[in-house]
Image (spheres, rainbow, N blue to C red):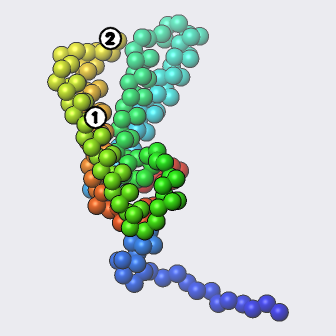
Amino acid sequence: MTRSVPFRRRTRPDSAAEAEREQGWREPAMLRAWGSIELWIAVVALTVIFLSVLWQVISRYVPALNWQGVGELAGYSLIVLTFIMVGYLIGNNGHITIQIIDYLVKGRAFTVVKAISAACTAVICAALAWEAYNLIVVYAGRHTAALGIPLWILYAVPLIGFTSGAIRAVVRVFAAGHEDAPFDAAEAR
């Protein structure tokens, strides 16, 4: 004889604290909006890389389509993709971490470890953003070889990415006591 369990419909959480516990900590709305912009820029860069490589393959068989700028475009799109995603990954717990400490340290000590880790990340991102700014100042008048893109535009991408990473890391310092939502690359927020 089996015992039936009545179906219990899931209702809304009674309080905001219960809803936060259920979903995990979320970034402020402004940073989520900025993250979606970063994600869209990354999608555009990935599309440009795909089309540039496809162009290069086709141009091997159709020499009339050979163009020097397509290789440069693919390379710089990879740079944009890499640096623009720095802040997004830091903000969404998608950056590379060594999780052995996560399994060894529990409670308040784990919160301290997360806060110190986020603070170190913020300092490193701020230092790299400063270096990107210096590159913009030093190479303001130079251009790329094939496309003629001003180098300051290319150096602005790491400046934006590392500044975003530093801001998100500072936010993570103050949110260290909250549970992190696991990063799922298939469901980018």
Q: Residue at x 48, y 55 (%)?
A: 101
Q: Earlier in the sequence, mark 2 or mark 1?
A: 1
* Numbered disc 2: secondary structure: loop
Amino acid, disc 2: Ala
Q: Residues within 10 Å of mark 1 (few under 14, many from 20)?
A: some
Horizontal relation, residue 79 to residue 131: left or right: right
Horizontal relation, residue 166 to residue 61: left or right: left
44 or 18, nearer to the observer: 18
Q: Residue at x 33, y 45 (%)?
A: 121
* Numbered disc 1: secondary structure: helix
Q: Which residue is mark 2?
A: 145
Q: Is residue 176 above or below residue 77?
A: below
How far apart marks 2 and 1 lie (CA) works out to 25 Å
Q: Residue at x 39, y 63 (%)?
A: 109
Q: Is residue 115 visible?
A: yes
Residue 162 x, y percent position in the rendering: 29, 39
Q: Which residue is mark 1?
A: 128
Residue 34 x, y percent position in the rendering: 30, 49
103 or 170, nearer to the observer: 103
Count of numbered tags: 2
